[in-house]
Image: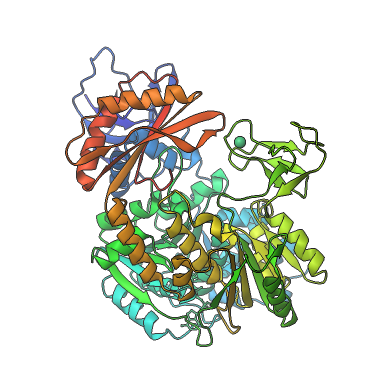
Amino acid sequence: MVIIRIALSVPVDILFDYQAEDASSHDIGLRACVPFGKKKLTGIIMAIGTETQVPIEKLKSVYCIFREINPLPPALLDLFQFCSQYYHHPLGMVIMNSLPVLLRNNKPVKLKDSAQHPLRLTDSGRRIDITTIPARNRVARRLLTEFQNATILTAQQIKQISPRTSKLLIEWKRLGWVTEKPTIETSPSKTTPIPTLTADQANAVTTVTAELERFNTWLLHGVTGSGKTEIYLRLIESALSHDKQTLVLIPEINLTPQLEAVFRARFRTVLLINLHSGLNDTQRLTGWLQAQRGEAKIILGTRLAVFTPLSRLGLIIVDEEHDSSFKQQDGLRYSARDLAIFRARKTNIPVVLGSATPSLESYFNAINGRYRYIRLASRAMQSARLPSIQYIDTRIHKSQAGLSEPLLKALEKCLANKYQSLIFINRRGYAPVLLCKSCTWSALCQRCSSRLVVHLRDKKLCCHHCGHEENFPRACPQCGNQDIAPFGQGTQRVEETLRAHFPAARILRIDRDSTRRKNAWKEILHAIHTHQVDILIGTQLLAKGHDFPNLSLVGILNADTSLYSTDFRASERLFAQLMQVSGRAGRANVAGHVLIQTEFPDHPLYHALQQHDYDTLAQALLTERKIAGFPPYVYQALLRAEAHSIKIVLNFLKQAAHLAEPTQAIELYDPVPAQLLRLKGMERAYLLIQSTSRKQLQTFLAEWYRQINTLPTRQVRWVLDVDPIEF
Ligand SMILES: Nc1ncnc2c1ncn2[C@@H]1O[C@H](COP(=O)(O)OP(=O)(O)OP(=O)(O)O)[C@@H](O)[C@H]1O
Ligand SMILES: [Zn+2]
């Protein structure tokens, strides 16, 4: 009897056995559809055997095994296993949630488009003069133009240009203009000039390339504008020359257009896919399959892309490795950066973590020799220097609507010089709220323990935690006072003030609202690069990764709000963020200046920032952490729980704590309510567990997880959060 053992997306961490006479060991990693209770479910075959614990009369037969696409490779199955064990999350849920939606349902994959090979423009195709095609052949003209821009087009992309191209393409293939043959031609295109590496860059490239064949975690710590992207390009080029794939992980979908354009321009003949969260189901499946088949050579993506099957993986790059977006904040709370390191180790290939402001964890590992450490101390462009940083003491310089006189003066000067400037508003824990000054009533969200944020433009109050929206009240609901006004500076308020002050300036506000539309980012970036904008106003979205050559002045508002936070990571984050946003200034031929409004100009964090001195601050923070017993000196996990009332939650956590058998190596703390107690109508609390030994913590968690699962938890939702970064 042949038994297949399947991982299904159900909240119990076991494999399920089914009979499947036609199965063989080649089927491991394939999808199979099986009966499950009254339902049909599709899961992944993890093992094949001849024996089962299930009584024969209860053993059911598989409906079918889907063999139209290749099985998930063993290395990927290893990654899933590790992920499930390390984060204590059911294996089937780990796997199924990482797969493209079209692979999760009970149907075979329709391979019509995704199976077709992408087409590549040949040299003779490139030489065709577009004007030789009659103007009335609009489809032909558009298609050729697209090919001449991108060189490689997938079936999907071609279909988007026009659904009526098949005849045309048959003809073009016959003429030798396009071909299905993949190329491993890796010589970079001649059209974009390739810079000569700086000494620091050259050193980085040589050092890593010398060890492309084996696992190492490299921390590439280069100041803002030091040209880390160029290093990535050279490393990718090396990987390509061995016909290997590179996985590039980035924190934000907003950063992809810029990076994608740079990569495409450099590697015109190579298939690059972009697996971000904005794709539709078919696009995602297509890219995923091209990656699995090894056709896509460069895979660019956010967090989830770490789970892409890659048959010829040779290099992983994690850009902006310090960014908290790499950690998933619900469900399976994985860190894509940490999984990338695991994956690289298993595959025996290098993983490069790049940042101007490494996380303290990575920095700690680098100075201890666990990671290999590469530093880039200066900016890549000869003319570029790190910006000058100055503080505006807001106790002396009073401000109008948040903007002080010296900052307004500096903006004026920048405008006169025709340079761009950026006003950055630190939003963390600070946004404009509606306040009644006579009775101190403020507008609260009904479902979360948070204040509603004022959106001036559409006269709405919004909850930034659950998305709830309501209209402005006419008067204070508590005392009837009609004079209720927004309090605090949001991006919209600052925009209004600046517009009034500089009526001729072209001002662009960038926040979640203004970037939601499809292609919004592409248009914004285009506007900035073609200098259709004088002043940018934005929040965290603008802080990272961008390269705007003409940006000279950065003004920072509300930084102080994070200085004295209770979160032990607040200083690290604030420093990273300020260094990143300051780093947008003066990256090319214009000098950069940064002005920070603060009430605490003498704070050590600001001192370090002014000196661009990452090390002094990092060392100081590490010392603090060591004394206080915080990561990276200990390893942490949270048991997070939520229910309709905090009493139920705390009760559950106490029961769970009771089940635990802490050893000497494990510290178990009392349950505490979360800082944001109510979220989307649920009340939340957590319990902290920590240990100086990661291994012991894991052993403890595995046993404890098993026991918590035996508790009656009908009213409670709970999850283990390993290596939590938010409390
Ligand atoms: N060797 C070089 N010679 C001249 N210019 C270079 C060189 N390398 C990179 N540059 C240019 O320097 C600028 C900054 O490079 P890049 O955006 O890669 O910096 P970065 O290290 O990623 O910085 P950040 O961490 O701030 O994102 C870019 O405009 C890039 O084209
Ligand atoms: Zn809410």
Percent of width and height locating residue 612: 45, 74
Would residue 530 be seen by someone viewing this image from the given angle? no
For the question of whether residue 552 can be seen, the reply is yes
Q: In the image, 452: left or right of 651?
A: right
Observer-nearest residue: 533 or 153? 533
Relative vertical location of residue 111 with respect to residue 475 in this rendering, above or below? below
Q: Indicate the quadrant containing the C terminus: top left, top right, bottom left or bottom right.
A: top left
Of all residues, the one furthest to the left in this rendering is 664
Residue most extreme to the top: 57
Please name the residue shown 71% across and 42% down the image: 435
Residue 715 in the image: x percent, y percent?
A: 45, 20
Q: Is residue 138 above or below residue 35?
A: below
- Seen at 69% across and 54% down, the residue is 514
Residue in the image at 51% along x and 55% along y: 562
Pick the residue in front: 318 or 630.
630
Looking at the image, is 217 positioned above or below residue 512? below
Q: Is residue 189 left or right of residue 15?
A: right
**The one of 188 and 260 positioned closer to us in this rendering:** 260
Residue 484 drawn at (x, y percent): 77, 42
Image quadrant containing the N terminus:
top left
| Quarter of the image where one finds residue 33 | top left
Residue sitting nearer the eye, 474 or 339: 474
